Image (cartoon, rainbow, N blue to C red):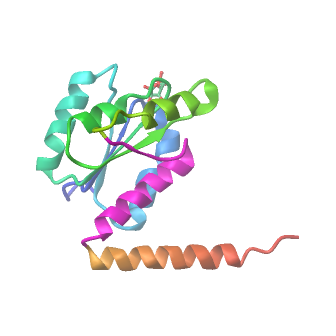
Amino acid sequence: MATQSPLVSVLMGSKSDWDTMQHCPAMLDKFDIAHECRVMSAHRTPDLAVEYTRAAADRGVQVIIAAAGGAAHLAGVVAAHTPLPVLGVPMMGWSLNGLDALLATVQMPAGVPVGTLAIGKAGAKNAALLAVRMLALHDEELKGKLEQFHADQTREISAITLP
Ligand code: RP5
């Protein structure tokens, strides 16, 4: 999606988050949503994170998804520097099964919202789907694709047979 300016930014604190977060852009691709994926960290590259975030709205970005593990401050820092909706995805990390990242992402002070998704792969997919739902509020074609997605999902799950 290099030719179109991104509607959704998918940020992650480390390249090590990609194995999980790749499911997020894969889901956005199903809906032909222009997006870009970047690694930046609230701790290791704080200036980059703030500069990128401050410029995002003027570049046409409409939703920012931010994933991080451990002391997961990326989504919160991003939300503090943009009026755009920010969706946080806690990563499983190297200990505590992602509970540390979940709490760090979800426990934002009143006034700076981060919509926090589930830990790991489910959160990565659902962050994309929630971004699609937001964009579909003002896009009838996208709304139709979303309805089709849910109809397909329902049909596929209903068709499962077990031995
Ligand atoms: C966080 O620290 C990243 O988002 C990642 O989940 C975690 C570990 O990063 P690495 O040490 O693997 O680069 O900031």
Which quadrant would the N terminus be assigned to in this image? bottom left
Residue 23 can be seen, yes or no: no
Q: Which residue: 36% across, 63% down?
A: 132
Q: Is residue 22 magenta?
A: no
Quadrant assignment, res 39 = top left
Main SS of residues in magenta: helix
Left or right: 158 in relation to 93: right
Quadrant assignment, res 138 = bottom left
Which quadrant would the C terminus be assigned to in this image? bottom right
Q: Position of residue 121 (x, y in %)?
A: 55, 47
Left or right: 93 in relation to 140: right
Task: Please name whichever residue, 149 or 111, is drawn nearer the observer in this view of the structure.
Answer: 111
Left or right: 160 in relation to 44: right
Task: Please name whichever residue, 124 or 36, is drawn nearer the observer in this view of the structure.
Answer: 124
Q: Position of residue 28 (x, y in %)?
A: 39, 59
Residue 115 can be seen, yes or no: yes
Q: Does residue 48 lie above or below 11 as drawn?
A: above
Q: Which residues are magenta?
A: 113-138
